[in-house]
């Protein structure tokens, strides 16, 4: 008789997560964030998420990183058309167009202060903060 072992891994979510509702293109939103928050978000190679079968989902990804602070802007809906029923990076939050992950944001780029700054942008219709540890598919956001 063969024994089966299950590996349970608890992923550490050491970042703050914000959901953005915006009809802006990803590059326009990144530019607006750069201007408002004095950042230099730069486009990265698209994030590829393999799915069952041969299909994969593709998400635009912008990054700003210093020795202390890291910001990542992700488009939540796949860039390519998909027959997959939930073509989202974070299917838990499918009503949000973009996700912003902030590591070590300090006072200015954390919590309610950042939500207020994001909501003030004309390119953003709504912004809110989430607890990333509650995400069902949090492994999609850990790079």
Image (cartoon, helix red, strand yellow):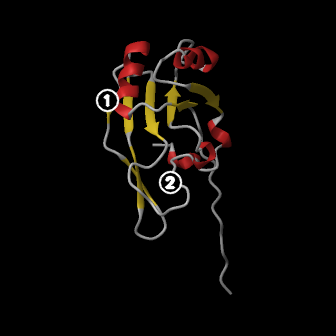
Circle 1 residue: 42
CA separation in Å, label 2 and label 1 = 24 Å
Q: Residue at x 45, y 71 (%)?
A: 53
With 141 as the anchor, is 79 left or right in this view?
left
* Disc 2, SS: loop
Residue 124: % across, % down: 50, 24
Circle 2 residue: 87
Quadrant where the image shows the C terminus: top left
Q: Is 3 above or below relative to 25?
A: below
Quadrant where the image shows the N terminus: bottom right
Residue 43: % across, % down: 31, 34
Nearest to the observer: residue 39 or residue 5:
39
- Residue 1's label in the rendered image is none
Q: Residue at x 52, y 22 (%)?
A: 104
Give the farthest residue toward the bottom.
1
Q: Nearer the viewer, mark 2 or mark 1?
A: 2
Q: Is 89 above or below relative to 85?
A: above
């Amino acid at each position: 008789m063969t024994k089966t072992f299950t590996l349970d891994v608890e992923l550490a979510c050491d970042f703050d997560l914000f959901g953005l509702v915006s009809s802006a293109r990803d590059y326009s939103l990144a530019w607006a964030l750069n201007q408002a928050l004095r950042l230099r978000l730069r486009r990265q190679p698209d994030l590829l998420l393999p799915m069952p079968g041969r299909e994969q989902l593709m998400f635009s990804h912008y990054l700003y990183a210093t020795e202390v602070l890291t910001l990542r802007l992700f488009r939540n809906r796949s860039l390519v058309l998909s027959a997959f029923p939930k073509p989202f990076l974070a299917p838990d939050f499918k009503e949000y167009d973009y996700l912003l992950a902030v590591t070590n944001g300090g006072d200015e780029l954390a919590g309610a202060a950042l939500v207020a700054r994001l909501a003030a942008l004309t390119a953003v219709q709504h912004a809110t903060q989430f607890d990333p540890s509650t995400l069902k598919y949090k492994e999609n956001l850990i790079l």
